[in-house]
Image (cartoon, coloured by chain):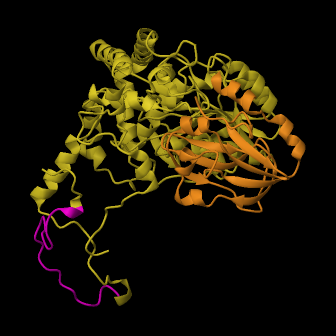
Amino acid sequence: MSDIPEDLLFNSDHDWVRIEGDTGTCGITDYAQGELGDIVFLELPEPGDFVTQGESYGIIEAVKTVSDLIAPVSGEVVDVNIQLTDDAALVNDEPYGEGWMIQVRLSDPSETEFLMDAHAYAGLVDE
Amino acid sequence: MNRDKLIFERGAPGRRCVAFPAAVDSGTEIPETMRRDVPPGLPEVSELELVRHYTALSQMNFSIDTHFYPLGSCTMKYNPRVHENAARIPQIAGLHPLSENAQPALQILWEMEQVLKAVSGMDGFTFQPTAGAQGEFVGISLIAAYHRAQGNTKKIVLIPDSAHGTNPATAAICGYSVQAIKSTERGTVDVEDLKAHLTEDVAGLMLTNPNTFGVFEDEIEDIAALVHDAGGLLYYDGANLNAFLGQCRPGDMGFDVVHINLHKTFTTPHGGGGPGSGPVGVKQALLPFLPLPVVLKEGNAFKLDFDRPESIGKVSSFYGNFGMVIRALVYAKMLGAEGMRRTSEMAVLNANYIAAKLDPHYDRPKNAQPMHEMVFSASRQKKANGITATDIAKRLIDYGVHPPTIYFPLPNVAPETMLIEPTETESLEQVNDFIEAMIQIAKEAEENPDLLKEAPHATPVRRLDEATAARKPILRFKTNNP
């Protein structure tokens, strides 16, 4: 059973967001990193770029496959986890901690109503 | 012999295969600016060391000549040796590529074009693309040229989510943005989702038929009508043509552009033994845009036509990989139309036999009857014992089978996939051995999962650490004179 923290929101592409005031920190879920396997490379946006809910904001490459990162919220990128450039394995080791990807200044906080809470996401993963 | 050494790590300084006489340097022929400061960093080995090194490497090959190779969507057939004989006839093999009026060579290209027109239902072909991916690039470039000639500036290419990765890459390189179309429960194109994406901005739909689940797109005529009504064109990725070669034709289904992989369907070597050949065929309306030159027949003579003002231009040197066209033509002539029908029938029979025998032991994500290949999933084994598609693939090597294609279709379409394509060239005994190995591995997954986790056991190198290799590559290519 994969780990699903209670304080996060999720989209159906297995991306999470942690909302703190008007910023949202984004990453991929424990389930997603488990399905992808060993992650070897990430392509992330630059601070100042704009990401849109439901659209790709980056690329994640594992040994067996390459996937899009789907933004759970829209807004301007204010911070990018540059640690991942040197150590993509952080996403496998700590998907909800040191493996975070980008921090976004929310352009439309009401978008969160399209996301799932931990309980609903657990239902999706169980299917 | 120590197999771990690179060719650069063998030999000794100054050692050579052949002792050439010292070159005379007149000092005037090569300008000072063009001269090397240091000699090139070539291996310094004797001829015997050289031969042993590469012979040892060749003996480590896992190839269609040594093992069953059910690599899905790659159609790894046996490459009949008679094709090699034809391609090596000195008068053909020795022909200079600038002999542009060499009638027999032009006739070979023209005759193969007639074969491909007959099996595809298209109106004309180019043989310039040297692989399937380049065929796609040419095909989408032709579609773009056609739309531009009509004054259209369409921006989008639609591609099913189960498609080969080269499809979206091709569309993107040709300047289009890509939109994915969902698959149904059966693995076919979701027509409702297609309708939702069809706008006047859609340049075309790229489709493989049967698709990557090995399932025939039985709504293809409706799909073609929808795309055409919206002003788009249909592109046929010929990766899976082996499933219905001689039975039905992409041209009749409504496709406007096709590429055919001679190195798959027409048994020319590939998988390291290539080169490939990905001829592209088009319907009448796109003929003017084909790469130049094209081969024309006038009376009993053949010529290369360069006078094609609307052509997208040349896409490779000379006429593509001509040697592959010779091999493919021999294959086509030896089979004939009836032989081609038998080919696809046996390919589909082999695949369905495997699917039926393995159904009790592995999950099959899309529950539709496959044609020439099928997708199994290791999801049952993963849930029960943590065994992944990778573990099963690695264990198959111990049973003398090349692993099938894994994690394709992609994990977001179906989990832990194994795409198995036996082709028609395998015997019933070989197919049975494979089925037996897969059943045995399913048992091992329950009884001794560690055996699979640590596989392969019988290879010169064991399970490679692919993640560390990608994250922290150690590059050993070093020479004395960089």
Residue A90 locus on image (x, y percent): 55, 51
Farthest residue, direction front: A6
Q: Which residues are magenta?
A: B8-31
Relative to B330, A54 lies left or right: right
Q: Residue at x 71, y 48 (%)?
A: A26
Looking at the rendering, in which quadrant would you find the N terminus of chain A?
top right
Question: Where is B396 relative to B345, above or below?
Answer: below
Chain shaded yellow: B
Residue A112 locus on image (x, y percent): 84, 40
Chain shaded orange: A
Residue B380 locus on image (x, y percent): 49, 19
As for residue B144 lying within the magenta part, the answer is no
Q: Closer to the camera, B191 or B277?
A: B191
Identify the main secondary structure in magenta: loop
Looking at the rendering, in which quadrant would you find the C terminus of chain A?
top right
Relative to B225, B119 lies left or right: left
